[in-house]
Image (cartoon, grey):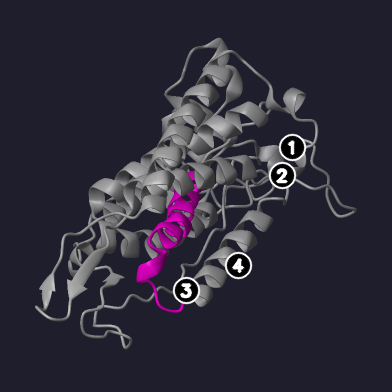
Amino acid sequence: MNASRDLEMGRAAKSRTHVYPHNFSPGRRVVYDLGDSEREWTPWLVSMIVLVNIAMFFVIMFVNNCPKNHNRLLGDCVASFLRRFSFQPLRENPLFGPSSSTLQKLGALEWDKIIQHKQAWRLVTSAWLHAGVVHLLANMLSLLFIGIRLEQQFGFVRVGIIYFLSGIGGSVLSSLFIQRSISVGASGAVFGLLGAMLSELFTNWTIYTNKAAALVTLIVIIAINLAVGILPHVDNFAHIGGFLTGFLLGFVLLVRPQFGWSENHRTQLKSKYTIYQYILWITSLVLVITGLVVGLVMVFKGVNGNEKCKWCHYLSCVPTSKWNCNK
């Protein structure tokens, strides 16, 4: 079923320098990061988001009530000993989860409901629903791997903004291109954190050691996870929309000031942002606001993105001899 946005895992190996550089010389001013990197926040928001998603899945399964509502022609409920928390027959949902009708009832992303019934709230609620245990585990493990480290470095406010806006960005792009099926999952938001990690590496480039290794590792992780999105029944538009939103927000929210030091006085000089950081900050802020506003307007006008871009459907599913992409 097309309710899956799954399988994004991994994080970049990052290394920061917090000691005087080897090439430090008397009277010479060097630039590197201090301040925020010295403080490590206690990560609680990411853990809370994971708990809320798990709790929400129990609510989904309670409402689903497979023994009472499943189609017996498709088979028996899986793990029937769980009673009303048991899963739909595997022929209906191979991810060990609820029926699509239950997800629709509780707020899945559905183009017709958003446009015809003015249910814009589905752009938000869909990110808190999951199609099954497999889907939930994939997303939550990814969120823990990626999110906790980011929250430790930048705090819950900035990470929270990136997470929630990326989820909306993923829903907006998905609504423009996926209009004949439902979609659920937190992967748009998780991909937003991946995008933010990449832009954070770029905007704070001077404070990293092993820059090339960090960049290659992160790009490989992102490429693999986006490649998974070309499989059928995976909403890669949500991945892409979330990634682009998070990538731009990273330049806005995760920028770090640079500090200069004087060897003669061993004193910290005034911190400052570099010119390229200012340029990236302004450009990204304009682009992310424009993108979200224009995207929302197009969604509420009922625009079909596939009519504007004839080849874009290949970004979410590439047909092969093993499967087709009919949705």
Amino acid at the residue labelled 3:
Lys
Q: Secondary structure at mark 2?
A: helix
Q: What residue is shown at x 48% (from left), y 55% (from top)?
A: 139
Give yes or no for contact between labels 4 and 3 (Cβ–Cβ under 8 Å).
no
Query: Closer to us: mark 3 or mark 1?
Result: 3
Q: What residue is shown at x 58% (from left), y 19% (from top)?
A: 298
List the residue tagged with mark 3: 211
> Can residue 262 be seen?
yes
- Magenta range: 187-211
Amino acid at the residue labelled 1:
Cys
Q: Is residue 119 above or below residue 158?
A: above
Distance CA(mark 1)–CA(mark 4): 22 Å
Within 10 angstroms of label 2, few (less than 14), some, or many (20 or more) residues? some
Q: Secondary structure at mark 3?
A: helix
Please report whichever mark, 3 or 1, sits nearer to the chain's N-terminal start: 3
State the image quarter where residue 131 is shown.
Answer: top right
- In the rendered image, which quarter contains the C terminus? top right
Within 10 angstroms of label 3, few (less than 14), some, or many (20 or more) residues? some
Give yes or no for contact between labels 2 and 1 (Cβ–Cβ under 8 Å).
yes
Q: Position of residue 83 (x, y in %)?
A: 44, 47
Q: Position of residue 76 (x, y in %)?
A: 62, 47
List the residue tagged with mark 1: 312
Amino acid at the residue labelled 2:
Leu
List the residue tagged with mark 2: 315
Please report whichever mark, 1 or 4, sits nearer to the chain's N-terminal start: 4
Q: Is residue 304 above or below residue 173?
A: above
List the residue tagged with mark 4: 220
Q: Is residue 299 above or below residue 85?
A: above
Amino acid at the residue labelled 4:
Val
